[in-house]
Structure formats: C-alpha cells, structure tokens
C-alpha cells in the first residue's frame, strides 16, 4: 500500500532538511542522500515507502521541494535546510522586487531587525506576492513584505535561486523592506 503523499513529503522534508540523523541517514556536503539508503533507513524507522514512492513525491511536489541527481540515484531538499549544506548555487542578480510572507505577529520584529534565517541557513523570498502570502498563511494571519532586492544587490548583498525558484539570501536589512498594505501590494 502506498504511503500518504502528504505524510511522505513531510517526512522527506524533515529528514533531508533538518534531521537526517533521526533515521541514521548520511547527507553529503551538498545535501544529497542515496535514495536506496533513504528508503532502507526510512523503512527501518517505521515509515514505510519505496523508491517509486520517493520518485512520485518528487514528481508531484507542487512546491518542487526536492531535486534528483542527474543519474537518478540521489535526492536532496531544494532549500530550507537547518543542517549545514552547500547547494552549490551560483550568485544571481535578483528581480527588482521580491516578496516575503509571514504572520502579522512577526511584523514588528522584522521591521526592527530585518529578515533573518531563523532556524534555516538562509532567508527565503518569493518572486510573486501570491506565493509569499501563501507561505505567510501557514503561520497565522499573513503579512506581506516587499523586498528591494535590486537595491540589496547593488549594495553587494548576494542572492541565489534554488532549483524550485525560491530566492535565498543571508539577511534582509530593515531598510530594504516595505510592509505591503493589508489585502496585497
């Protein structure tokens, strides 16, 4: 019987982003894990799934959370790691404006400190308002920030784009942020 796709996606995200050691899985420095090892150790930990289930999770992930190696033998999370990995992403010039969705309860702290990675390695930014608001809704009533990404880039701050389109940077200082009015930008 195939596992619940949502449960499997959450399990893969947890193991590949945050706690590979929870099942005794080894990630290489770029965050890759052998699919066969993931399946074996995942099953041994009590989460039953197959290689085909993993491939289906990758193929059907609307957020493209996972990447497969060119030879199809390895998998990694596209971004969102709290464990140290080097995704090997080249610095890129971002669009002029990027967006960050969050819960309204975090607005004051963000306006004071800017955006910080929190438990992740980098700050995650979206290329469009709708995606950012969807992310913000996961944490409560959403708030939307516009990020002057081009201004940051001009000041020498670095951006990378993950395989799934998420923009990554180390920190967004408060003076590059504008709180969008309620109901959108």
Image: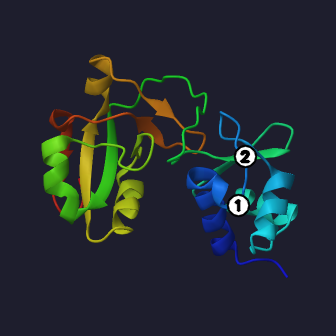
Q: Nearer the viewer, residue 10 or 64?
A: 10
**Number of numbered tags placed on the structure image:** 2
Q: Position of residue 56 (x, y in %)?
A: 78, 63
Q: Is residue 179 visible?
A: no
User: Which residue is depicted at the point 74% across and 57% down?
Assistant: 59
Q: Residue 163 vs residue 95: left or right?
A: right
Can you tell which quarter of the image residue 43 is in? bottom right
Residue 154 drawn at (x, y percent): 29, 18
Residue at figure coordinates x 53%, y 47% from the top left: 81
The image quarter in which residue 184 lies: bottom left
Disc 2 packing (10 Å; few <14; some 14–19; many ≥20): some
At mark 1, the secondary structure is loop
Q: Can residue 10 be seen from the camera position used here?
A: yes
How crowded is the residue under tag 1: few (<14 C-alpha within 10 Å), some, or many (20+)?
A: some
Q: Which residue is mark 2?
A: 26
In the structure shown, which secondary structural element does the residue marked by tag 2 occupy? loop
Which image quarter is the N terminus in? bottom right
Residue furthest bottom as drawn:
1
Closest to the observer, 89 or 28: 28
Residue 61: x and y, percent? 65, 60
Taking the image as shown, residue 105 lies to the left or right of residue 140, namely left
At 86% from the left and 54% from the top, the residue drawn is: 36
At horizontal 26% and vertical 55% (from top left) the residue drawn is: 144
Disc 2 to disc 1, how far (Cα)?
Answer: 9 Å
Q: Which residue is mark 1?
A: 23
Say if 137 sits above or below 180 in the image. Answer: below
The front one of 172 and 178 is 172
């Amino acid at each position: 019987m195939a596992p619940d796709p949502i449960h499997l996606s959450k399990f893969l995200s947890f193991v590949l982003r945050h706690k590979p050691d929870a099942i005794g899985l080894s990630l290489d420095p770029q965050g890759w894990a052998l699919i066969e090892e993931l399946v074996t150790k995942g099953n041994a930990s009590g989460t039953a799934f197959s290689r085909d289930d993993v491939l289906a999770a990758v193929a059907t992930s609307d957020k493209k959370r996972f990447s497969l190696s060119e030879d199809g033998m390895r998998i990694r999370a596209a971004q969102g790691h709290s464990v140290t990995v080097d995704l090997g992403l080249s610095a890129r010039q971002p669009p002029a404006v990027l967006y960050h969705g969050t819960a309204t309860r975090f607005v004051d702290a963000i306006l004071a400190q800017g955006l910080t990675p929190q438990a992740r390695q980098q700050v995650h930014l979206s290329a469009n308002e709708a995606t950012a608001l969807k992310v913000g809704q996961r944490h409560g009533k959403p708030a939307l920030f516009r990020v002057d990404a081009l201004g940051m880039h001009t000041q020498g701050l670095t951006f990378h784009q993950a395989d799934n389109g998420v923009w990554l940077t180390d920190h967004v200082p408060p003076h590059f942020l504008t709180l969008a009015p309620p109901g959108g930008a």
